[in-house]
Image (spheres, helix red, strand yellow):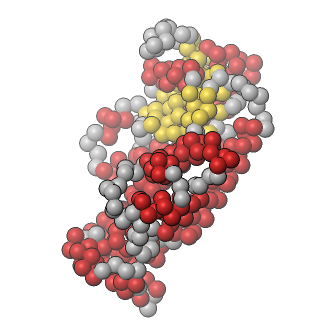
Amino acid sequence: MSAVGRFDVHAFLRERGVPDDEIAAAEDQRTLPLLVIDQLLFPGRPRYDEDTLVDKVGVDRDYARALWRAMGFPGLPEGEVAFYDDDLEALRSAVIGDPMRELLPNLVHQTRVTSAAMTRIAEQSTDDIERLLNDLREQGAPDEEAVRLMVSVFQVERFEQLLWYIFRRQLRASLWRRLAAPEPGAPTTVGFVDLVRFAAVTENVADDELERLIVRFEEVAYDAIVDGGGRMVKMIGDAVMFVADDPERATLVAIDLVDAYARDDLLPPARAGLARGEVLARDGDYFGPPVNLAARIVDVARPSRVVVSDELRDALLPSGRFSFRRLPPKRLRGMGHPPIWAAARASD
């Protein structure tokens, strides 16, 4: 018999202190998989309320509450036992001695940024678990069978190792990119690419088909941006924002993306808007006039067209790799009628 077949759900939960009545209630409410995943993530039972947790660590209560809020969780009722040994160790790791207390706001801010990124990862993992559970239920499998399968693939330690590895890789790349190469204030090219009429196209599609479209959109965008030497900043609904230090690379990424979506059988056509200038990089996002301008430009671009700002065109002209056509003046919200240009490869 396989390890999955030998797994005893009830014994697993009882060994971790889950009462029989709680197990029975979970079976009745069809939340048994959640109860098991709870024990995989936080084995055992909660042991501490807020007062006990704070007293054990010897940390300022307001600071502990600020960290908890920064993680995205609301305050708990007084006296509620909700914290585990893992919470205790995490809070201990966040304690800073008196000589470095000026760093406390930075740590709270870092917690907020990290939590925002981890929230998206958690939501994506929930998507996968939900899909697996629904598929098994549609096949008539009992929840105990679904639990056995999830336990076999749900390897918390391996996932932690992967996250730590990815973070180290990303941190190393970010440090060298930001601190070693460009001079302070070096211009950055910002691009927005969005799908045209995406809302209309997806208005009557089923959820699983909509998910296919979204995943396809993200795959095409991510691959083209990374392969072209750009950096994905974020997905915003049916749009993607990216940046690149090199203006030629950024423009080629936009052209390649627009071309890729035009050829794709699943997705509607796309359009792109790009601008160049000095930006503020903060918490993985970018701010400043070039960002605002690029976002306004994409709103007025026609399908399958790449439109660039005057400043970006000036930076691209010396290369001779692009052709430009000045577009009729268009009012950009809050920016008047700046010169904008349709850009293409010189051979196109």
Residue 40 placed where, x, y %? 45, 72
Q: Residue at x 27, y 82 (%)?
A: 20
In the picture, measured across the screen, residue 168 lies left or right of residue 261, that is: right
Residue 299 placed where, x, y %? 44, 22
Residue 227 placed where, x, y %? 65, 43
In the picture, measured across the screen, residue 269 lies left or right of residue 324, that is: left
Q: Furthest residue to the left? A: 28
Q: Residue at x 64, y 21 (%)?
A: 277
Q: Residue at x 53, y 55 (%)?
A: 59
Q: Furthest residue to the bottom? A: 1
Q: Nearer the viewer, residue 335 or 206?
A: 335
Q: Nearer the viewer, residue 5 or 108?
A: 108
Q: Nearer the viewer, residue 300 or 278?
A: 278
Quarter holding the C terminus is: top right
Q: Is residue 84 visible?
A: yes
Vertical order, 243 against 118 (above or below): above
In the picture, measured across the screen, residue 75 lies left or right of residue 331, that is: left
Quarter holding the N terminus is: bottom left
Vertical order, 292 against 243 (above or below): above
In the rendered image, which quarter is residue 125 located in?
Answer: bottom left
Q: Nearer the viewer, residue 326 or 185?
A: 185
In the rendered image, which quarter is residue 174 located in?
Answer: top right
Q: Residue at x 75, y 22 (%)?
A: 319
Q: Is residue 242 visible?
A: no
